Image (cartoon, coloured by chain):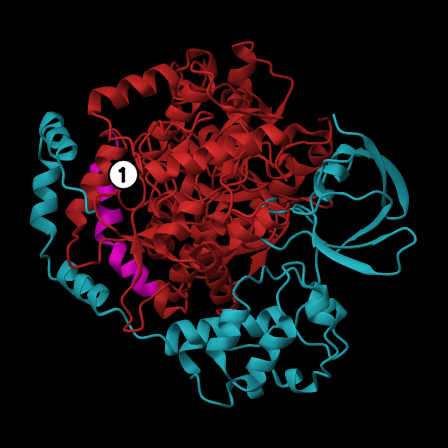
C-alpha cells in the first residue's frame, strides 16, 4: 500500500493512502457515499469537488473520482447545485438569432471575470462557450461545451448567476436538430424498413437451423 | 507516469507496430476453445446453483445467487415499524400513496428515459423513480457508439447475423429482430431530439466497426456517445414535465390478489424512510450489475449497478434468462491504479489500435467479439505469463498511438477526447505511448425474460427494458447494441405500458409475494445473513 498522507474532509483530518482518488479516499476513511458519487469514471458530474492545499491560497476544482489526493488538501464536495432550468419545447424553437436571448438572457450579464473557466473541473473554456451563446453561434457553443459533465461548479462560482451547463446543452440540442443536415441514407433505410423490404430476408434467417446460420456467420464477408 | 520496466516494454511495441503484424481472425473452433479454457463464464467456481424461485436448479454468479437467496430489505427494523398498517390503510382507501401514477418507471437511465418519453406521448401519467440522480446510469458511460444498419451496404439481416453469431446463437430471435429492424429509426429519433452524432458535412453519419461487426455501422458522438444520448433524453424528460423522484430506490414490487403488480415499495436513499407508489403498469429499467464485482473483477459500471431489478422481479415470480452470462470488456484501464477498471472504449481498437504482450507480440485480432478478446488477454496474462506487471496483477498493451499514425495527427484528440483527458490527468499521453489494459466487468448479458412486447410472461402489468432484460443479445453482446437496445426497447415498453395502463384499475398493494418468498427461504433453511436488493456497494471496508 502507498504511503499515508493527511487529507481533510469537512475540516477533519484523515490518514489515507496517497495513491487514492478523492472519492476512494473518502470511502477509505469510512464515508459510505450516497450523494456526490455517480458513474465513478468522470462522465456524470455527480462529484464536483472544491479543495485548497494548506498554505496555498489558490482554490482548486476537480471531479472527486478523477483527482488523486494531495497531502494536506481540504476537501469540500458539491453534490448538487441548483441550476435555473427554462421551460421549452425543442420542436417549437428555432435556431434563430434571438433564441439564447429569450431563454437565457442572464448570459448578457456576464462580466467576463473568467471564474467559470478557472473553475471548470474538465478544463473547458466555459466563458468562451457562453460568449459564443451570446453571439448565437450555436455550433461553436456546442463544440466548446461538448465535454461538459454538468457538475455545476461554474454556476456556483458565477457572480452573474448563469446556469452554464444548461446553455451548452440547449446549444447542442439546437445544433443537433436544426443546424445539422439530415442523413439521407438513414431516412432511406427507415422508409425501406417501413415498406417491409427487409422483412423477408430476416424471416429467412430466423428459419435456418443453427448449423446453417453458423455456416453463414463464419463465412460472412467483413467490410475492410 | 509509467515505471521504468513499463517504458522499456512500451519501446518494444514501437518496433512491433512498425512491422505491421496483425493476427488473423480465429476459426469458430479456435474461438470456442479459447472461451472454454479462459473465459470466466466457463469457470465452474464462479457460480452457485439457485435453490429457490423460477430458476431453481440453474446456476447464477455467486454474488447474484447470494442476493436471490437473501431476505428482503423490507425486513429491516427501520422499515418494519408500521408498514403493514400503512398498506392496510391504503387498501381501505383511508390514505393515499406518496405517488399515484399510470406508468411507474423504476430507473433513470437511457431505457427509463426513453420509456418515459414515449409513455408520456401515449397519454399516460408517468413517474420516474431513480435511486441516485436522473441519468446516473451505465448509459451515461457508454463511449464508443450505437449500432444501426442504415448504410447503403448494410441491412437489418446483416446486423442480425452479426449479433446472433456474436451472441453464440442464443438470442431470442423475436427480440433481436426487433432490435435490428428498429435501429435506423432509433437513430433518427435521437437525431430529432438533438443528439449530436458525428457526421460528414452532407449529413452522412460517420460510422466505424466494432468487435464482431461485418459492416461499419457504429454511430458515435466522439467518445461520449452514451453521455450525449443520456443528457439529451434527460433534458427531454424534463422538458415534458415528467415527474422525476431522485434518491429513491424501489426495494420491492407490490402485487395485488391476482399477482399483478400494483405498485412499489420505495426507500429514500438519504433518509432511509419508505414511501409507496401505486401504478397501473410498471417498467423495470434498473440496469446492470457490475458493482456486484462478479469473480472479483473491477468494473466499468456505474455506482448503482447492483442488479436490483433482477432481485425484485425474481421475488415476484419472474424468470431470468442467461443470468450466468457476463461480459468482461477486454480493455479496462489497468494502470494507473486510480483509473483501475475504467472503460477504454472499443472504438480505440476499431480505429486501429492493436493488442500486444510484454514481448511486443500481437496475440489476438483486436476486433474479435468481446468475450474472445477478453479470454485471449486473460490467457496472455495468466497461463502464458506474458503480461506487463501492474499493481493489480498484470496487463497488456493497447497500442493507441497507431490511431494517429493511421488517420492523421489530431485524430485521437478529435474522436477520443474523453479517453485522452482521462489519461492526460495522470501524465499519460495516449497519442505518444500505448496504454495498459485488462478486462473489466462490463455488462450483464442476461436478465429478466420478456415477451416481444417488453412485458414479463408471468407477472401481469410488469415490463422490463434495458440492461435488466435477458435474451436480446444471447450470451455475448456486441459493442453498440446496448445503447441501441435501451432506445428500442425503452420506447417499445413505454408505448405498450401506457396502452396497457388504460385498461387497468389498480388492485391491492400487498407484499404477499415477499412474505411467501421469505417463508420458502426459511423452510429450505437458506440463510445468507444479508438483505437484498443491494442498492449500493460498500467500499468503506476496503
Image quarter in which the N terminus of chain B is found? top right
Tag count in the figure? 1
- Between residue B215 and residue B161, name the one nearer to us: B215
- Between residue A213 and residue A133, name the one nearer to us: A133
The part of the image, by quadrant, that contains residue A213 is: top left
Q: As displayed, is residue A103 above or below residue B57?
A: below
Residue A129 makes an appearance in the image? yes
Q: Position of residue B534 (x, y in %)?
A: 60, 32
Q: Which residues are magenta?
A: B170-189
Q: Position of residue B462 (x, y in %)?
A: 40, 42
Magenta stretch containing residue B173, yes or no?
Answer: yes
Secondary structure mostly seen in magenta is helix
**Chain A tint as drawn:** cyan
- Between residue A60 and residue B21, name the one nearer to us: B21
The part of the image, by quadrant, that contains residue B539 is: top right
| Residue picked out by circle 1 | B212
**Chain B tint as drawn:** red
Give the side of residue A68 with respect to residue B47, left or right.
right
Rate crowding at label 1 as few (under 14), some (14 to 19) or many (20 or more) other CA atoms within 10 Å.
Answer: many
Image quarter in which the C terminus of chain B is found? top right
Residue at coordinates 62% horizontally, 55% vertically from top-left? A45
Amino acid at each position: 500500500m502507498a504511503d499515508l498522507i493527511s487529507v481533510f474532509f469537512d475540516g477533519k483530518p484523515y490518514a489515507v493512502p496517497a495513491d487514492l482518488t478523492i472519492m476512494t479516499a473518502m470511502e477509505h476513511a469510512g464515508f459510505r457515499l450516497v450523494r456526490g458519487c455517480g458513474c465513478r469514471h468522470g462522465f456524470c458530474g455527480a462529484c464536483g469537488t472544491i479543495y485548497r492545499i494548506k498554505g496555498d491560497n489558490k482554490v482548486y476544482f476537480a471531479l472527486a473520482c478523477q483527482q488523486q489526493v494531495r497531502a494536506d488538501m481540504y476537501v469540500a464536495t458539491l453534490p448538487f447545485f441548483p441550476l435555473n432550468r427554462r421551460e421549452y419545447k425543442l420542436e417549437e424553437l428555432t435556431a434563430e438569432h434571438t433564441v439564447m436571448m429569450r431563454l437565457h438572457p442572464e448570459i448578457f450579464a456576464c462580466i467576463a471575470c473568467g471564474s467559470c473557466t478557472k473553475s471548470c473541473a474538465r478544463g473547458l473554456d466555459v466563458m468562451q462557450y457562453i460568449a459564443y451563446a451570446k453571439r448565437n453561434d450555436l455550433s461553436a457553443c456546442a463544440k466548446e461545451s461538448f465535454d461538459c459533465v454538468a457538475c455545476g461548479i461554474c454556476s456556483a462560482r458565477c457572480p452573474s448567476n448563469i446556469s452554464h451547463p444548461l446553455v451548452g446543452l440547449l446549444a447542442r440540442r439546437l445544433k443537433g436538430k436544426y443546424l445539422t443536415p439530415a442523413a439521407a441514407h438513414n431516412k432511406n433505410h427507415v422508409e425501406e424498413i417501413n415498406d417491409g423490404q427487409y422483412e423477408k430476408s430476416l424471416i429467412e434467417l430466423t428459419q435456418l437451423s443453427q448449423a446453417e446460420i453458423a455456416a453463414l456467420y463464419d463465412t460472412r464477408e467483413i467490410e475492410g | 507516469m509509467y515505471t521504468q520496466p513499463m517504458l522499456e516494454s512500451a519501446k518494444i511495441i514501437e518496433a512491433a507496430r512498425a512491422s505491421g503484424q496483425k493476427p488473423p481472425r480465429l476459426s469458430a473452433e479456435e474461438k470456442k476453445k479459447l472461451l472454454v479454457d479462459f473465459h470466466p463464464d466457463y469457470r465452474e467456481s464462479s457460480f452457485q446453483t439457485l435453490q429457490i424461485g423460477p430458476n431453481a436448479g440453474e446456476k447464477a454468479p455467486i454474488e447474484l445467487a447470494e442476493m436471490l437467496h437473501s431476505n428482503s430489505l423490507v425486513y429491516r427494523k427501520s422499515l418494519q415499524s408500521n408498514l403493514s398498517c400503512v398498506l392496510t390503510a391504503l387498501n381501505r382507501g383511508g390514505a393515499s400513496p406518496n405517488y399515484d401514477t399510470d406508468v411507474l418507471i423504476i430507473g433513470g437511465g437511457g431505457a427509463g428515459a426513453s420509456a418515459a418519453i414515449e409513455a408520456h406521448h401515449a397519454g399516460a401519467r408517468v413517474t420516474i423513480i431513480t435511486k441516485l440522480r436522473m441519468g446516473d446510469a451505465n448509459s451515461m458511460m457508454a463511449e464508443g457508439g450505437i449500432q444501426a444498419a442504415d448504410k447503403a451496404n448494410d441491412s437489418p439481416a446483416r446486423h442480425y447475423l452479426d449479433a446472433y453469431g456474436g451472441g453464440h446463437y442464443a438470442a431470442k430471435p423475436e427480440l433481436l429482430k426487433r432490435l435490428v429492424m428498429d435501429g435506423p429509426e432509433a437513430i433518427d429519433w435521437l437525431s430529432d431530439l438533438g443528439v449530436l452524432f458525428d457526421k460528414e458535412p452532407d449529413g452522412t453519419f460517420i460510422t466505424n466497426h466494432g468487435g464482431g461487426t461485418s459492416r461499419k455501422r457504429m454511430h458515435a458522438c466522439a467518445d461520449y456517445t452514451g453521455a450525449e444520448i443520456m443528457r439529451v433524453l434527460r433534458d427531454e424528460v424534463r422538458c415534458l414535465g415528467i415527474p422525476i423522484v431522485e434518491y429513491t430506490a424501489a426495494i420491492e414490487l407490490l402485487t395485488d390478489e391476482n399477482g399483478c403488480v400494483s405498485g412499489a415499495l420505495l426507500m429514500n436513499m438519504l433518509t432511509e424512510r419508505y414511501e409507496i407508489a401505486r401504478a397501473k403498469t410498471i417498467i423495470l429499467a434498473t440496469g446492470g450489475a457490475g458493482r456486484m464485482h462478479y469473480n472479483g473483477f473491477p468494473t466499468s459500471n456505474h455506482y448503482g449497478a447492483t442488479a436490483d431489478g433482477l432481485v425484485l422481479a425474481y421475488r415476484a415470480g419472474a424468470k431470468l434468462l442467461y443470468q450466468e452470462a457476463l461480459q468482461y470488456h477486454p480493455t479496462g484501464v489497468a494502470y494507473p491504479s486510480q483509473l483501475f477498471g475504467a472503460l477504454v472504449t472499443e472504438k480505440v481498437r476499431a480505429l486501429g489500435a492493436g493488442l500486444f504482450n510484454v514481448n511486443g507480440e500481437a496475440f489476438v485480432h483486436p476486433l474479435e467479439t468481446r468475450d474472445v478478446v477478453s479470454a485471449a488477454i486473460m490467457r496472455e496474462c495468466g497461463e502464458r505469463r506474458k503480461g506487463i506487471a501492474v499493481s493489480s496483477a498484470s496487463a497488456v498493451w493497447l497500442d493507441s498511438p497507431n490511431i494517429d499514425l493511421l488517420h492523421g495527427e489530431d485524430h485521437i484528440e478529435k474522436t477520443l477526447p474523453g479517453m485522452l483527458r482521462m489519461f492526460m490527468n495522470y501524465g499519460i499521453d495516449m497519442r505518444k505511448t500505448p496504454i495498459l489494459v485488462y478486462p473489466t466487468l462490463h455488462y450483464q448479458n442476461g436478465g429478466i425474460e420478456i415477451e416481444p412486447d417488453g412485458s414479463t410472461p408471468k407477472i401481469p402489468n410488469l415490463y422490463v427494458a434495458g440492461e435488466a432484460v435477458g435474451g436480446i443479445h444471447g450470451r455475448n453482446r456486441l459493442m453498440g447494441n446496448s445503447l441501441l437496445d435501451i432506445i428500442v426497447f425503452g420506447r417499445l415498453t413505454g408505448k405498450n405500458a401506457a396502452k396497457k395502463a388504460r385498461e387497468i384499475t389498480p388492485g391491492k398493494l400487498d407484499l404477499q409475494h415477499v412474505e411467501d418468498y421469505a417463508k420458502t427461504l426459511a423452510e429450505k433453511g437458506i440463510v445468507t445473513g444479508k438483505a437484498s436488493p443491494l442498492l449500493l456497494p460498500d467500499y468503506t471496508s476496503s
